[in-house]
Image: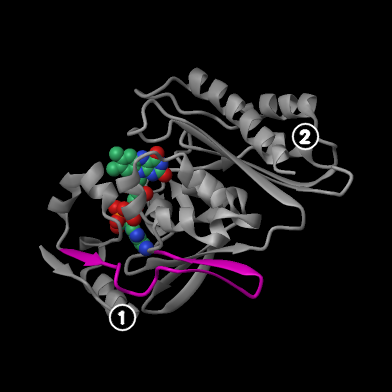
């Protein structure tokens, strides 16, 4: 197996194209080393993408731009993603209790796994776009379309994620994140992210309710029924309860970590908790 550590994007793209499916880009490397070490036996080239200058958090043209190799702890500590419109990032990272993983794992790695991780659930609630680069240039795919299924993304051979972008949330936006796991060292069994935009009188203009780790689809899904209950209404405890009950439109998976019934119950509790956190921000 060959190991490469390119310092130019074009060099990285050339390597990924040359080796095709036999190459893997690695960023924090916590997924393979933590969960899937055996996959290294199947590859011919490992391309370390940490030296490509993709670790940054900035706002340009009203768009939040996060470089693919930005770590979870960089998101947790940066002033843009730990306060104001985007503090949901710090709140999401705060629910991952292993500091070593937070120091290494990157936002690009989180979105490329398409499995039981936290950040894509939040990115779906915030209408994020994933910027993909390759030898033929860059393209943008919505978070919703980027995940095709469990461990399956819209990346084509020779491509990699270079950036995550978020449009500026509408005024008076607030968010909440909730998570259930067995132990601090476990992956999430259920996570929920919500984003609300409220009028001055408290009426909900826009709502996103996103559920991850628990879905039958294997990737985060929006609860459209819960969102519809919230929009154009003033949000109080009774409405939150109604929205939480409606979130059973998200089909849950039944596997060795939890039954679909238990997950559905935790989704309901998670939606309630995340909505209460969002409302409490006001
Ligand atoms: C014990 C443990 C517990 C954990 N608990 C949680 C948790 O509760 N919540 C949570 O959110 N995360 C958790 N994680 C982290 C999570 O499981 C992944 O390991 C992490 O998100 C991967 O990020 P990475 O940068 O290390 O990616 P890597 O391990 O480097 O890569 C992961 C995958 O993405 C691909 N990839 C990476 N970056 C790119 C890119 N820019 N473009 C294209 N492909 C790319 C790689 O080829 C690989 O297939 C945990 C990890 C461990 C080890």
Please state the horizontal and vertical placement of residue 220, each as a whole percent of the image: 52, 42
Q: Is residue 53 magenta?
A: yes
Image height of 52 relative to 276, above or below: below
The label number, if any, that marks residue 251 in the structure image: none
Segment tinted magenta in the rendering: 45-68
Marks 1 and 2, the one that precedes in the sequence: 1
Please state the horizontal and vertical placement of residue 120, each as a whole percent of the image: 49, 49
Which residue occupies 77% across, 53% down?
172
Between marks 1 and 2 in the image, the one whose residue lies nearer the viewer: 1
Label 1 near ligand 1 (CB < 8 Å): no
Helix, strand or loop for disc 2? helix
Camera-side residue: 259 or 267? 267
Please state the horizontal and vertical placement of residue 202, each as a whole percent of the image: 85, 42
Which residue occupies 77% across, 57% down?
171
Q: Please say whether residue 150 is visible from this viewpoint.
A: no
The label number, if any, that marks residue 8 in the structure image: 1
Helix, strand or loop for disc 1? loop
> Which residue carries the number 2 mark?
229
Q: Is residue 145 magenta?
A: no
């Amino acid at each position: 197996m060959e190991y490469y550590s390119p310092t130019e994007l074009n060099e990285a793209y050339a390597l990924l194209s040359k080796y095709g499916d036999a190459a893997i880009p690695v960023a924090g490397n916590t997924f393979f080393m933590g969960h899937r070490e055996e996959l290294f036996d199947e590859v011919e080239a490992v391309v370390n993408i940490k030296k490509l200058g993709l670790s940054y958090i900035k706002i340009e043209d009203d768009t939040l731009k996060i470089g693919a190799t930005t770590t979870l702890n960089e998101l947790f500590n940066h002033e843009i993603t730990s306060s104001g419109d985007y503090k949901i990032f710090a709140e999401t990272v705060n629910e991952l209790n292993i500091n070593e993983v937070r120091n290494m794992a990157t936002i690009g790695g989180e979105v490329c796994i398409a499995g039981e991780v936290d950040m894509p659930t939040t990115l779906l609630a915030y209408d994020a776009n994933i910027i993909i680069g390759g030898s033929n240039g860059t393209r943008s795919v919505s978070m919703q379309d980027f995940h095709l299924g469990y461990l399956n993304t819209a990346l084509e051979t020779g491509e990699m994620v270079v950036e995550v972008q978020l449009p500026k949330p509408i005024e008076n936006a607030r968010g909440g994140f909730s998570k259930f796991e067995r132990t601090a060292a476990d992956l999430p069994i259920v996570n929920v992210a919500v984003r609300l935009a409220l009028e001055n009188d408290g009426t909900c203009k826009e709502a996103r309710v996103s559920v991850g780790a628990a879905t039958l689809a294997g990737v985060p899904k929006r609860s459209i029924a819960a969102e519809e209950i919230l929009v154009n209404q003033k949000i109080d405890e009774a409405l939150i309860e109604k929205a939480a009950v409606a979130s059973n439109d998200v089909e849950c998976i039944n596997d060795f970590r939890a039954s679909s019934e238990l997950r559905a119950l935790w989704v309901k509790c998670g939606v309630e908790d995340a909505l209460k956190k969002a409302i409490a921000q006001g």
